[in-house]
Amino acid sequence: MDQSGRCRIFIGESRALLRLALPVWVGQLAFSAAGVVDTLMSGRVGTVDLAGVGMGASTWAPVLFGMTGLLLGVSPMVAQLAGGGKKEVIADVVHHGLLLALMAGLSVALLLQCMGPVLRFMGTPDSVITVTLLYLRGLGLGVPAMAGYLVLKCFSEAMGDTRPQMLISLFGLGCNVCLNFLFIYGGAGIPAMGGAGCGWASGLTFWIMFIGMAVYLMRARAFRSLRWVRRPRFRRAPLEELVRLGGPISLTLFMEASIFGCIILFIGGLGSTVVAGHQVAMNFSGLIYTIPLSIATAITVRVGQATGRMSLHDAMNAAWTGMGLALVVAACTLTVTFLLRHMIVAVYVPDPAVRAMAADLLILGALYQLSDAVMTASLGALRGFRDTAVPMRLTFLAYWGIAMPLGYTLGMTDWLVPRMGAAGFWISLITGLSLAALMLLLRLLRVRKKHIHRFLQ
């Protein structure tokens, strides 16, 4: 194929990916912006409230990612069924996904109520623990609704309609801001909870989002035709298939997110300023991460639909084009983060010491964005191929075999260099993400070769 032909394919695939990815990005941005709002509003109450909310959010994040990953098996299954023209089976996948969501949501809600001993073991100050536990108590009430919302979101995205989750996420952001004011400062018979009120506001917002998505999918003609609103017929096999696909994704996301959670637990004993500065830098980095994550979601859908119709050529075009887009975006966000880091942290918090800490950490945060883009895009493509078990093992090696031990060594000990605190952990993140990106890219090439033989049989 000549250069102009490749260019046309790249442009055409880029448009298709962006049509899917842009609404997903806006929705994820709105969801992440809720975390930014929590950080901003709790930071205005006080440093202890900011540290407590940051500790709660860091405790909740790995659990959320793990639960999300477990339910993400819905997406490649629905995408491949849609691509292969087997739409009559899709409702069955959705029903079993909702059943799995209910079980996972209740389990996570219970887990969040038992974090007190863990926080005390990590040496977190009592004043911060009080805020964190109250935050998690309110958040836990909305976890089952968030799990159900994630299943319906995957269902909608895999069918190629990413706009509903965008609109509902934007509406949820508005609700979260209003509810934050109510629970933080009190009113309408609700006592003032300070920064911990953010957790109660989030829990209620999760229910609003779940109900909104369910109503849309019940009323939209394209989804009504799938007859997914009917009496479910639960069986063991579809549930096992969802767990087989989603289980490794869950562990992959949990391992990634738990590193960030463990870091803040380790540095919790270094004082509120260090924790707050780390939280500001981590919050903004999470906001940037929504961009490659949305592209990866689009890659999963496009690759899944292409493999459903047995077209490896289309699947790999989606994978490589998506990775190129993610790298271009990462180069831009890296530059913006580095040049504007002082202005960014000034928006979050007025404390000069927290600002200085956060600005230094954002330099390191900018460096891992290229590796993060390759890693995330590769994972998106591999999920479209329904390859999830091997990526889980590779990310475990990168995150927990290398990054976490290195981070503890650099950040909390004097074994290699004088103790670096939070910066040592961020350096280890760069190392772990870069290694994960390389291994997952090689895995994608191996899966491509495997599917060449499969499609030729």
Image (tube, rainbow, N blue to C red):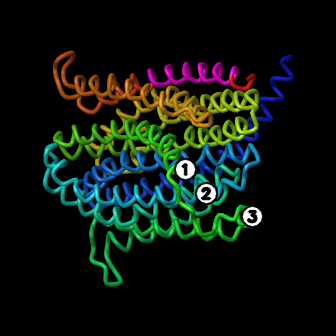
- Is 396 placed above or below 155 here? above
Mark 2 near mark 3, Cβ–Cβ under 8 Å?
Answer: no
User: Spatial distance from mark 2 to mark 3, Cα to Cα?
Assistant: 14 Å
Horizontal arrangement in the rendering, residue 109 relative to residue 235 (left or right): left
Q: Amino acid at mark 2?
A: Asp
Q: Which residue is mark 1?
A: 238
Query: Quadrant of the image for the C terminus?
Result: top right
Q: Which residue is mark 2?
A: 92
Question: Residue visible at 36% across and 61% down?
Answer: 106
Query: Quadrant of the image for the N terminus?
Result: top right
- Is 31 placed above or below 193 here? above
Mark 1 near mark 2, Cβ–Cβ under 8 Å?
Answer: yes
The earlier-in-sequence mark between 1 and 3 is 3
Q: Is residue 166 visible?
A: no
- Is 47 placed above or below 262 here? below
Mark 2 crowd level (few <14, some 14–19, many ≥20, 10 Å Cα): many
Q: Which residues are magenta?
A: 434-453
Magenta-colored stretch includes residue 246: no
- Mark identifier at residue 225: 3
The earlier-in-sequence mark between 2 and 3 is 2
Horizontal arrangement in the rendering, residue 431 relative to residue 249 (left or right): left
Question: Residue visible at 23% across and 44% down?
Answer: 273
- Magenta stretch secondary structure, dominant: helix
Horizontal arrangement in the rendering, residue 22 relative to residue 272 (left or right): right
